[in-house]
Amino acid sequence: MSNERLIRKIAVIFVTDVVGFSTLMERNEALTLNSLRACRAILEDLFQEHSGRIFNTAGDSVLAEFQSAVSATICATEFQKLIQERNTSVAPEAKMHFRVGLNMGDVIVEGSNLYGEGVNVAARLEALSQAGGVCLSKNLYDFVSQKVELSFNDLGTQKIKNTHVHAYDIALEGIAARNTASAKPAVDKATNKPPSVAVLPFVNMSNDPDQEYFADGVTEDIITNLSMWKTFPVISRNSSFSFKGTGTKSKEIALQLGARYLVEGSIRKGGDKVRITANLIDANDDRQIWSKRWDRALDDIFDVQDEVSQEVAAMVSPTLRGQEQKRAANHKTENLSAWDEYIKALSAFNAEADFETVEDLCHRAFALDKQFTDPYFLYTKALLKLRYSPQGYTQKDVIFEKLSRAAKFVYGLDPENSAAINCMVNVHWMNMDIDRTLALSQKALDINPYDSNANFSISVAYAQNGDFESGIRHLNWAFELDPVSKRDWTVALIMMNIGADHLDHALSLANNALADHASDTRYLGFKTVILGLLGQEDAAAVCLSDFLANRPEINSLDDYEKVAPDAIKQKALTGMRKAGLH
């Protein structure tokens, strides 16, 4: 070969494959292959119409060559539209989603096959594409953007494996636009990441300790207001409040939360007056960079909360100075009594009070201001928590009806608010409507890319669809935004790494989790599965023994199948079988 002259040419390369194909095959091989044949027939008809030539296939993947960049682009968009149409007319288990990558570049010709950088970049763009989407390189975009009636979303330069590629998405109906290159947040030069902000619980300086809930409520509202800016991440309430009353030094808190800036403050409430102080700390050198005090009438509390968040935002991201806060169109309240009932409900929820107490307080807030969205958000969170509690299973139908009714109401009030969208995401997830869960989660992230709940929701939806790599990416980002929730979410991360065949990493995650939570049977179960899949059968058998000792209701593989995660069920059963469970 080294003595032969290589034949090279410029070609437009089209690469596509099925999202989560291996998972679909594990669930139902016959149905999946029939669906693939039907989708492949659609694709081949389009290739014939637009003069595309298939030069390679492997399983669910198709690689094709086009002589025309415009033809390839139109073919790709028509393919995704026809697949969307097909998915609306078939049973949920027969639906398929494809990614498409397009590139124009230099290729090597060998017989009927093509190799080289032009093909490799197209394959990497296909991996970058969203489910149902088309992703193309800048050189192809430059050629076709003025020749086709399509809109494009500039993703900027993306690092894919060892290559940097300037990529664009084609804007397709039903596929949410990803963040554009022009909308990137401010970046901390030291870490090359947006600087995170954590708001610590404001200290109650009132003489009445019963006003603790009031200080917490103000803090929560400031966190919510800050999170409405899209230029920097705000650490979640769960993580910030985990340090309440611990006496931990600011620098240590910032280190544990991964935050560059901390907001600290205090509140003194007396009669119809309130005093609020707030400080902004740069955790890099433990230096106070801003401080302010407000002495106001109690009725002005909402204005003060807005002012705190605006001034903090201007300090953290100087390009925002002088701008008005860009809020989602959420329905706040001017009714102090409704807000007071809401923050009492919030305090009860965070203190692990029983559901009935939280529900009663939320309903009091509803009665005082039906347009106030915050208590509806809280109510749906309480319902979801109840649903997944031990007593929730017996009430699941009643809970779902209440959750659905509240979520639809608040979404109708405020469809552009990420919290409202997350309420509807929970409804679709409980219905196992993965397509709608993905679409709405992406909508929430377009509004607020730093929403930890939306990142978690989209991660598990991707995993359920078999797209484990996308799930892992979003879940890791959720960890950064809400470090304290890591214990609960690590279970999902281990599951996704098993699905993606990152077994060594999955084992490391399980071992680390067990070091802190030795009796947690979720981690024991996954470790057993991983060791079985790795072929370490003796170690797997020991781990299985520990697992079964803590799960007396599991005596056979059939018992385990009832609790194995759907997204990786076949792999989980294989691992358990190799560990010795029959």
Image: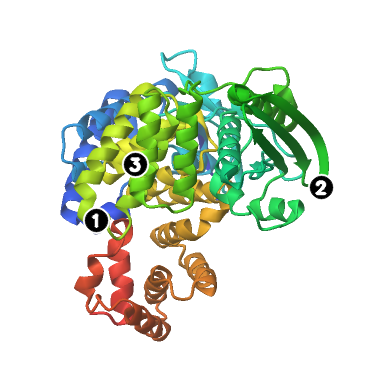
Q: Which residue is mark 1?
A: 393
Please identify, in this view, whether the residue under mark 1 or under mark 3 is nearer the observer. Answer: 1
Tag 2 secondary structure: loop
Tag 1 secondary structure: helix
On screen, 287 above or below 405? Answer: below
Which residue shows up at 74% across the image and 51% down it?
A: 250
Marks 1 and 3 in Cβ contact (< 8 Å) = no
> Sequence-wise, which precedes: disc 2 or disc 3?
2
Q: Which residue is mark 2?
A: 286
Distance from the alpha carbon under mark 2 to that under mark 1: 48 Å
Which residue shows up at 75% across the image and 26% down it?
A: 318
Query: Residue 460: horizontal and vertical position, in percent?
Result: 39, 49
Q: Which residue is mark 3?
A: 426
**Pick the front one: 421 or 118:** 421
The residue type indicated by label 3 comes to: Asn
Which residue shows up at 23% across the image and 38% down it?
A: 39
Distance from the alpha carbon under mark 2 to that under mark 3: 39 Å
